[in-house]
Amino acid sequence: MAASFARRVSRFFKRMGLVGYSKKRNIFGIHPLLISTFYILIALFLASLARKLINVVLGDTIFKRMLLEFIATLELCAACFELIVVADNWGVWAYALYLFLLTIWWGKSWDVASACPYSPIEDILDGMQDVSNAALLIFSQILGALVTFRYVQILWAMELVETHRSKAFEECVADLQVHMIAGAIIEATGTCLCRLTSKFLSSTETKFGNILDAFFATMMVVAAFNFSGGYFNPALATSLKLGCDGNTFVEHLVVYWLGATIGSVISVIIFRSSVVQNYLKSLKVKMD
């Protein structure tokens, strides 16, 4: 009876497309997308565990915030390394679905961490952060971004599925498909729009605001995907694409650091303008 049940389960999984792949190239004949999903979930689980431990052990200090930023950045970059595999093998819309769900999760689980270097800069402009603390947080984010590939490389080197073959040691290729200035404008515009959307939804306490925010950010990434990659985050871009073939160091800095940071600063200026603030006040009056 047990053998009969096992065969029925095996046939069911094969009909669902979860197994039945070449066992020579995929462990147990499992669908490669399941392994990519598993690797992403591992990163989320380990980061969540580390956050819980830090919150229990440490008080509210700058060192604790640095650790939280380091973990959040490592979690973000590890998941996005695997999303590269998803995009390369199952297309941009599969990538978009995963990114959308992950963005919702990160919005709920990161708390004060942002995993993004321009967030502390925004806090400086808003008077919520001093320069020295902001520099420490950005340093933690950069460190998290730079060490992530060593973790990912270990997983890819196991080559459990065909989509990970040679990934651990292959040369990466830059995503920038347009001129440096055009790329910087794309990253700046996307960052500005994403930040304005986040600020507006947060300020108005819109119902399902986190889902709307995640959806808008995902669509912006998809829109820029074939031009600059749509990173809108300097730390993420550095982790995934710094030193890749097709970009110089200067191009990387201009597009992904200068472009995104300028877009972030512009979003702060626009959001703090009297026009936007008066509109938000009138909106709150109507809602009350």
Image: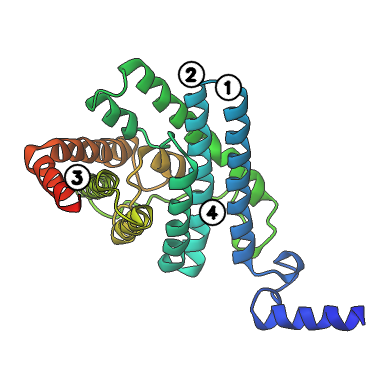
Examine the image and state in which quarter residue 49 appears.
Answer: top right
Q: Which of 247 and 229 is in front in this view?
A: 229
Q: Distance between the residues labelled 3 and 2?
A: 39 Å
Location of the N terminus (image quadrant)? bottom right
Amino acid marked by disc 4: Glu
Q: Which of marks 3 and 2 is in front?
A: 2
Residue 179 point in image, percent of width and height: 22, 49
Earlier residue among tags 4 and 1: 1
Residue under numbered circle 1: 58
Residues under labels 2 and 4: Cα distance?
Answer: 32 Å
The alpha-carbon separation of the residues under discs 1 and 3 comes to: 44 Å
Image side of residue 153 versus residue 262, left or right: right
How many numbered marks appear?
A: 4
* Residue contact between numbered discs 1 and 2, judged by CB atoms under 8 Å: yes
Question: Could you tell whether 23 is left or right of 127 in the image?
Answer: right
Q: Distance between the residues labelled 1 and 2?
A: 8 Å
In the image, residue 62 above or below residue 235: above
Query: Residue 184's x, y, as percent?
Result: 23, 44
SS for callout 1: loop
Mark 1 vs 3, N-terminal side: 1
Q: Kindly tell me whether residue 204 is visible in this rendering.
A: yes
* Tag 3 near tag 2, CB within 8 Å: no
Residue at which label 4 appears: 82
Name the residue that disc number 3 marks: 181
Q: Which of marks 3 and 4 is in front?
A: 4
Secondary structure at badge 3 equals helix
The mark that comes first in sequence, 3 or 4, is 4
State whether residue 21 is above or below residue 210.
Answer: below
- Where is residue 214? Give x, y as percent: 37, 55
Query: Which mark identifies residue 105?
Result: none
- Name the residue: 46% across, 40% down: 239
